[in-house]
Amino acid sequence: MGISADKSTTQITFIDKFGLTFPMIPDTTKQIIYAYGARGVLGVAAKRMTFLIDPEGLIAHVWPDVNVEGHASDVLSVIPAEARPA
């Protein structure tokens, strides 16, 4: 899932633009963003980060600076083939 401080209408545009196949959650209060330390410059905006959460609910890997183009390949490269979504 993705989480951003954007409104759901803005997220829909982002999902369509990049062809995302996972849900986006609006965090307009930034509670989740702050809990994961994803504050952007001066804490005003969210920093684009990815957290890979393992089956036990623990953070298994963090990408602190995400470039959307090609990022899915980066994430998949650290997930064992048998654990990847179908």
Image (tube, rainbow, N blue to C red):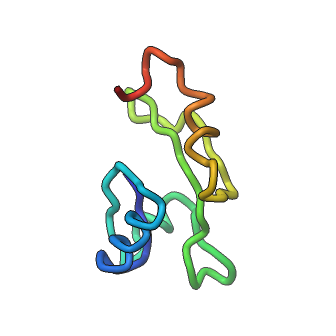
The percent position of residue 29, horizontal first and vertical second, equals 37, 79
Residue 33 versus residue 6 in the image, above or below = above
Of the 4 image quadrants, the one containing the C terminus is top left
Nearest the eye: 64 or 19: 19
User: Exactly how many numbered labels are in the figure?
Assistant: 0
The residue located at (43%, 25%) in the rendering is 84
- Position of residue 81 measured from the top left corner of the image (x, y, whole percent): 50, 18
User: On the picture, is 64 further left or further right than 29?
Assistant: right
> In which image quadrant can residue 17 be found?
bottom left
Residue drawn at 62 percent across, 29 percent down: 77
The image position of residue 50, as x and y in percent, is 56, 51
User: Residue 16, position in %: x, y?
Assistant: 38, 65
> Is 33 on the left or on the right of 11, as rendered?
right
Q: Is residue 44 above or below residue 22?
A: below
The residue at the point 43 percent across, 75 percent down is 5
User: 12 left or right of 46?
Assistant: left
Q: Quadrant of residue 2?
A: bottom left
The answer to which of 74 and 45 lies nearer the viewer is: 74
Q: Is residue 7 above or below residue 72?
A: below
Q: Is residue 27 left or right of residue 50?
A: left
Question: What residue is drawn where x is 67% and y is 83%?
Answer: 42
Say if 24 sits above or below 4 in the image: above
